[in-house]
Image (cartoon, helix red, strand yellow):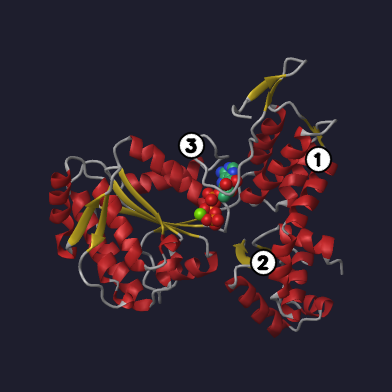
Amino acid sequence: MLFMIMLLTVGSGVAVQHSNPFQFGRELGTGELVDREKEIQLVRRTVENRGKLFLIGPRRYGKTSILKVVEDQLTAGGAVILRFDAEAYGSIDRLADAILTAATRSFSGSFERVGKRVAQFFGSLRPELTMSPDQSVTASIGLSRTRKEDLPTLVQVLNGVEAMAAGRDEPVALILDEFQFLVGAGQSAERQLRACVQRHRNVAYVFAGSKTHLLGELTGSPLRPFYKLGARHFLGPLPGADFAAFLRSGFEDSGYAVQEPALQAILALADEVPYNVQQLAHTCWEDLRTSEDPVLSEDVVKNALDWLVRSNDPFYTKLWGRLSRQQMRTVYAVIGEAGRGMFSHAVARRYGVPTPTMQSSLAKLVSDGMIREEQEMGTTRYRLEDPFLAHWLALVQPR
Ligand SMILES: Nc1ncnc2c1ncn2[C@@H]1O[C@H](COP(=O)(O)OP(=O)(O)OP(=O)(O)O)[C@@H](O)[C@H]1O
Ligand SMILES: [Mg+2]
């Protein structure tokens, strides 16, 4: 069908929406987020104050969406927001080029005028500008690159951005998502970056990342160069009541009846991870669309989850197949114990994994990104990064 019909009025006069209101796998924008007002305000004020902030949170908790909303809000007010996913560039040099290009595009006027402005702030890098047929300018660094460990080009680009920010009334911010990528460049790179960022007074910095364990240590250990470089905020889960209300209206506005236990089941089965909540709700919504009896019940939720994990079976099978026997037992222990008290004798006995092995297995599973460590109220808890893995295990690998 050529035209997407968004709304259809059914016999009862209720408007039924034809596009799924539950979105996952992309950054959300203004008006699409549940809660997060405080975080949006925090990032926004950091930029307006020309401050520095580390926003650290588990995978798929909505970090990038928060950054996107702030970018949209502030750009509308004239700010220059240079936002990048550090991991997407593959090398620090390519990231430096991308920052330079974005800074270049923030200058208005003719090609010559832009060239002059770029030379003013970034001249030491001998930038080369090219104009593509769609009139967008791309900048690349003409200077020959030195060793990756030395980071000089990125540091020079950031110094240029600082100089550029000094001459503007509206804020200029560099937002680096997944900034743990820079950490992989080594200690000397970290030190140089810190020295540069610490000196800057005019450009705001927001660093976001999802390796909570690594980033917590990087920014919180006196031995690491990022120690106390900026404020830190650890992103928590979304308030359950707000998320439930969002889900309810998504279903009800589409004309479907909702049973409260089913909503709670979506939240619980997705273990509060916003991405998984939206994915499960999305699947339920699609099922209801073709159902004779469009009522969101616990059965609908259970069937949707079964379908989701079965359709990801090859992925889970591969993931699971890479684990050693002890690591598999460790995963079962994390699920069975809700990740608590993992180093007790009782747990070691119950799952047949001696405590030192449990420790090393958990460390490996955390660094491989299968499990995350969460500190809460003075204790450590381990959780699956993908809560649906537990359901796949229950379904296809019953013990
Ligand atoms: N505040 C929110 N309200 C509703 N859904 C949300 C919210 N935050 C995140 N989500 C859901 O999670 C998905 C992922 O969001 P986002 O990409 O912003 O998270 P992230 O923490 O940056 O993830 P990653 O760790 O993969 O980079 C979104 O597409 C959406 O489905
Ligand atoms: Mg992200």
94 relative to 22 in the view: left or right: left
Quadrant of the snapshot with the N terminus: top right
Say few, some or many: other residues with alpha carbon within 10 Å of mark 3 (under 14 / 14 to 19 / 20 or more): few
Q: Amino acid at mark 3?
A: Thr
Give the image location of residue 242, x and y in percent: 63, 38
Q: Is residue 268 left or right of residue 144?
A: right
- Give the residue number, with chain letter if any, for mark 3: 30
In the image as oriented, which residue stretches furthest toward the right? 399
Residue bearing mark 1: 261
Q: Earlier in the sequence, mark 1 or mark 2?
A: 1
Is 15 located above or below residue 105 in the figure? Answer: above
Q: Please name the residue that numbered disc 2 is placed on.
A: 382
Which mark is on residue 334? none
Which element carries disc 1, helix, strand or loop? Answer: helix
Q: Nearer the viewer, residue 345 or 258?
A: 258
Q: Residue at x 52, y 42 (%)?
A: 28
Residue at left 21%, top 54%? 129
Check contact, mark 3 vs mark 2: CB within 8 A.
no
